Amino acid sequence: MPEANDKLVPASCPHDCGGRCFLNIHVKGGVISRLETDDGEKPQIRACLRGRAYRQRVYSADRVMFPMRRKGARGEGKFERISWDVALDTVASQLNRVKSAYGAGSLFFLYSEGARGYLHNSGTMRRLLNLFGGYTTRWGGQSAQGCSYACWATYGTLITDESRDGLIDSRLIIMWGWNPAVTIQTPNTTYHLARARESGARIVSVDPRFTETAAAFASASGGWIPIRPNTDVAMMLAMACVMIKEGLHNRRFLDKYTVGFDRFKDYVTGKEDGIPKTPAWAEAITGVPAATIESLAREYATSKPAALIPGWAAGRTAYGEQFHRAAMTLAAMTGNIGIRGGSAAGFGRPPLPFQKVSTYGFELPFPIGKNPLEEGAPSATHLDNALHDRYKVNTPKIWDALLKGKAGGYPDDFKLLYILCGNSLNQLLNTNKGVEALKSLEFVVVHEQVMTPTARFADILLPVNTHLERNDVFAPVSAGPYLFYSNQAVDSLGESKSDLEIASELAPRLGILNYNDKTEDEWLRELVEWGDFAEHIDDYDRFRNRGIWKWPLAEPALAFKEQIEDPEHHPFPTPSGKIEIYSQRLADLNNPGIPPIPKYIEAWENRNDPLSRKYPLQLITTHSLVRAHSTFYGVPWLQELEPQVVQISSADAQARGIGDGDEVRVFNDRGEMRIPARITERILPGVVGINQGAWYRPDENGIDRGGCVNILTRDERSPGGAFITNTCLVQVEKVKNR
Ligand SMILES: Nc1nc2c(c(=O)[nH]1)N[C@H]1C(S)=C(S)[C@@H](COP(=O)(O)OP(=O)(O)OC[C@H]3O[C@@H](n4cnc5c(=O)[nH]c(N)nc54)[C@H](O)[C@@H]3O)O[C@H]1N2
Ligand SMILES: Nc1nc2c(c(=O)[nH]1)N[C@H]1C(S)=C(S)[C@@H](COP(=O)(O)OP(=O)(O)OC[C@H]3O[C@@H](n4cnc5c(=O)[nH]c(N)nc54)[C@H](O)[C@@H]3O)O[C@H]1N2
Ligand SMILES: [Mo]
């Protein structure tokens, strides 16, 4: 209950998590005193522990309060406070200097998804730099490029799935590298899993780790199927092999809705390459017993309906596109696409109203505009990556591009780096290379809320307010069915400003006079009165006062319903109009790394790689319960809940003389960190796990003491562009006491 002089402010949370939940902020004397969450009508959109700890993030000692200018060497983290005028004049003069000396392409704009409001996001600076003349930037999502590539090739769209309330109809749910109790994909997913289990669904997890979701929901018998990382496709092919051999696949569905199954069948049976993809063949690769593969194949083919739900992590691997293509093929073989309680094994996006806005990057009322340097570039859905490379840099190669420029085959030589809404040094692959890249530039600008490892490398660091210090509208990544109006609760801390305010003040200094002619409230009002928003929300002020707008769904939102019920009038948005198990567009690329049918292609840095003699453990780098990537790092309540550790099996620990809690070195040729070991039976021997997102904190020898996983990862690219966070060999050793 609010106390007498409390003000209650309805808000939400905009960070890069699959959530978006309701927060009720208590404000006393202009200061946030505590936070509550949704207690209203059902479904309640209750915030997780991160949202509820947000007060500690707003008032964190890490907050950047004033504009700062670098004092020592770049990266040393020494700064002096300067005025906004000096800071903005400096940024403007550097932008003008670099553009006139080297051309607009030499400006590299590196933005990420740290703020996902409809108004306050990286689009504010994108608009300004588009008007300024353009820049080079990245292509390929860090989250799920492997999955989106596979969706475009197979289905022609990312709107591929059913809303989670549909899980109640599933008889079998296969969580394939999917851990939604921790890695939030949609608020309330675990509620729907609980309902499915109560109504009798069997729930299985295929994962190198026994996850929290498996612990809560997987069936007691055979519910956890541990698998070696990066080998999932072999198991999926063997499941297909069992179905084909036993005649369990849905021929009617395959004939009517798909193309190319025969080509896939020839590969699976060994007709194409002489190797039948049998369960015994897969057992040797995956470590999963042949009998387990056989029984899961039979169960999946005969439980109707059944939902195979892939997470994105198994696709953030070398050739990760194949994982998603194979999952979709199994969904087609079992006829589980476009039906209630099934799953297309797609991108996780149902056809809810705001999905098309967030998935297709519609021009919202705030006009981001176009980058003039990308004139003629193909849309992101184009499967020929060589075309994207001409205009942009694939995300895993950003550091390499900054270091090598044109000589390395990249579109330009880069001089100025502008970073926004990302902790890129920490979150992109191969942090040590990132350090070199950041040092090599002429100038680095960062807009940040907190003093991240990336912010420490800024020449000019501009302080940004948090969402509780401004107003915005948010939709959950799943697109609802609800929307939030997140109200400003307190004044901006220190001299911090929103990116929109910063860009508005920078614009005239760059000679741009038409950047922004509206207030925050005017932009948000226009947004809510626009398109899909207006269809669902009839009163801006009421929406704003309530902070949340829910509308009931009569039934689960289901992708491909029309395509399945009435294929004559509703083709799939692919060239053939069908689900493309065989893709002619992929065949035309003529690249064995992206074959036209899904194939098992052995990853580099796998257990058979000669490198495994030196670095025998496969590292997976998962998302954390207490952070959204690196956001929320350092919040004391959260840090206490989940210390940063390396999870190692007791077998691997014993072989190395490591005890629980011992400090260990985790290392390979790219880098080294020292963190405590957590010995567990919940991870497959041969595999170690570290949560991504802890801040990089190098000691005087360059050894990371913070536990930043990307000190270890390899900055390689996959043929389909997948961002590769889970293909990495390491060794773990006990630190000797001296
Ligand atoms: N709490 C929280 N929620 C988040 C985020 C966050 O940082 N924190 N981030 C959000 C974002 S941006 C994203 S992209 C998503 C990420 O969502 P995901 O990519 O699905 O999440 P991860 O935690 O990386 O991995 C999910 C599971 O995959 C398993 N796994 C890893 N490698 C393999 C493999 O090779 N094979 C198999 N079978 N399993 C494997 C891991 O053990 C883990 O249990 O989560 C979103 N939700
Ligand atoms: N090894 C490994 N690496 C990974 C992953 C993995 O699983 N393993 N996951 C990858 C994935 S899926 C993702 S999506 C990326 C995420 O990569 P990033 O987006 O770089 O990660 P975040 O830590 O969320 O960084 C967001 C930053 O934006 C800041 N921020 C928040 N709001 C605002 C704002 O309004 N304005 C400005 N200017 N800044 C703001 C936050 O303080 C934070 O520092 O990481 C990727 N990296
Ligand atoms: Mo992500």
Image (cartoon, rainbow, N blue to C red):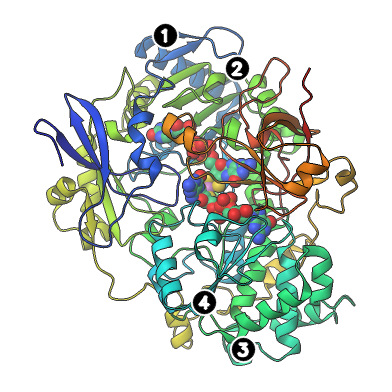
Disc 1 crowd rating (10 Å Cα; few below 14, some 14-19, many 20+) is: some
Kind of residue at badge 4: Phe
Q: Percent x, y for residue 484?
A: 27, 50
In-front residue for pair 481/409: 481
The residues bearing labels 4 and 3 have C-alpha atoms spaced at a distance of 19 Å
Residue 437 figure quarter: top right
In-front residue for pair 82/4: 4
**First reached walking from the N terminus: tag 3 or tag 2:** 2
Kind of residue at badge 1: Arg
Kind of residue at badge 3: Asn
> Can you say whether 367 is above or below 465 in the image?
below
Q: Which of the labelled discs sits on residue 572, or is there none?
A: 4
**First reached walking from the N terminus: tag 4 or tag 3:** 3
In-front residue for pair 521/737: 737
> Can you say whether 86 is above or below 590 in the image?
above
The residues bearing labels 4 and 2 have C-alpha atoms spaced at a distance of 50 Å
- Mark 3 lies on a secondary structure that is loop
Q: Percent x, y for residue 503?
A: 37, 28
Whether label 3 touches label 1, CB < 8 Å: no
Residue under label 3:
250
